[in-house]
Amino acid sequence: MTVWLPGPAMAAYRDGVTVICQLAAQFTDSTWQSQTPCTEWRASDLAGHLRCVVDDYHEYLDDAPASRLARLMATGVPADSLARKLARQNSAELAALPDVPAADHIAAFADSARSYARRLLPVWDLPHHRYRDLDVTVGGMAGMACAEWHLHAWDLARSLGTDYRPADPEIVFEGWWLGTPQRRPAAEGAGESDLWLGLLRASGRDPQWRHDA
């Protein structure tokens, strides 16, 4: 795969931020309480999570390649164990957020995500962290972030009863592949020729999930 280059990569990243904002604008006070494919979260929780995780990305970049994420990845523990540890971190951060409307969390997310993007190009090829024998650069971590925005856009769309698919699934998939080496076996085992469906499955999502499921 060769498409994860700074120009198209950052265009895909920005598209992910934009579509999250567009979808968020369609929610009302009541629909922010709707279920999402992230079974433990309602849409309002997902808005808060987006705000938290992009702030984490700033912290990881500040401290790379010796961030708390880098130290966790350096342990080389299996992907499922990593996921549980990060899920506990996500829950703690979400609980600590100020009690404000979900739309405020989305606005804070968008500002922070765009600020993060502006930091990336000068350090694109520098090391960010390492998992087992695989190095992840800053550009690779940007791929993880890009994929997360598009995956959560799908979550929000499904919560609204609609669907979402990125304009260029190949770019989003390659960013995810480069930034998430611990999850590559899940993608290889998904058995999907459609890269977007494969990414949904590899990230633990059911492509058939519906709001009334």
Image (spheres, rainbow, N blue to C red):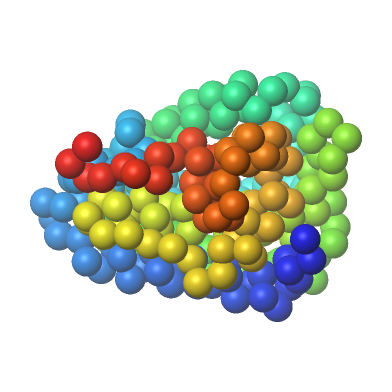
Left-right relation of 102 to 50: left
Q: Can you give x and y, in whole percent of width and height, for residue 208 in the image? A: 34, 44
Residue farthest left in this picture: 30
Q: How many marks?
A: 0
Identify which residue is drawn at 22% across, 55% down: 161
The answer to whether 49 is drawn above or below residue 101 in the figure is: above
Q: Can you give x and y, in whole percent of width and height, for residue 99 in the image? A: 26, 45
Residue 165 position by quadrant:
bottom left
Residue 8 versus residue 106: which sits nearer the camera?
8
Residue 189 position by quadrant:
top right
Q: Can you give x and y, in whole percent of width and height, for residue 128 in the image? A: 78, 49
Residue 154 versus residue 136: which sits nearer the camera?
154
Identify which residue is drawn at 77% across, 24% down: 75
Q: Is residue 137 visible?
A: yes
Residue 102 position by quadrant:
bottom left
Quarter of the image where the N terminus is located? bottom right
Left-right relation of 34 to 62: left
Q: Can you give x and y, in whole percent of width and height, for residue 169 in the image? A: 56, 63
Q: Is residue 97 visible?
A: no
Quarter of the image where the C terminus is located? top left
The answer to whether 156 is drawn above or below residue 204 in the figure is: below
Identify which residue is drawn at 60% across, 76% down: 11
Residue 131 versus residue 109: which sits nearer the camera?
131
Left-right relation of 21 to 10: left
The answer to whether 171 is drawn above or below residue 180 in the figure is: below
The answer to whether 184 is drawn above or below residue 101 in the figure is: above
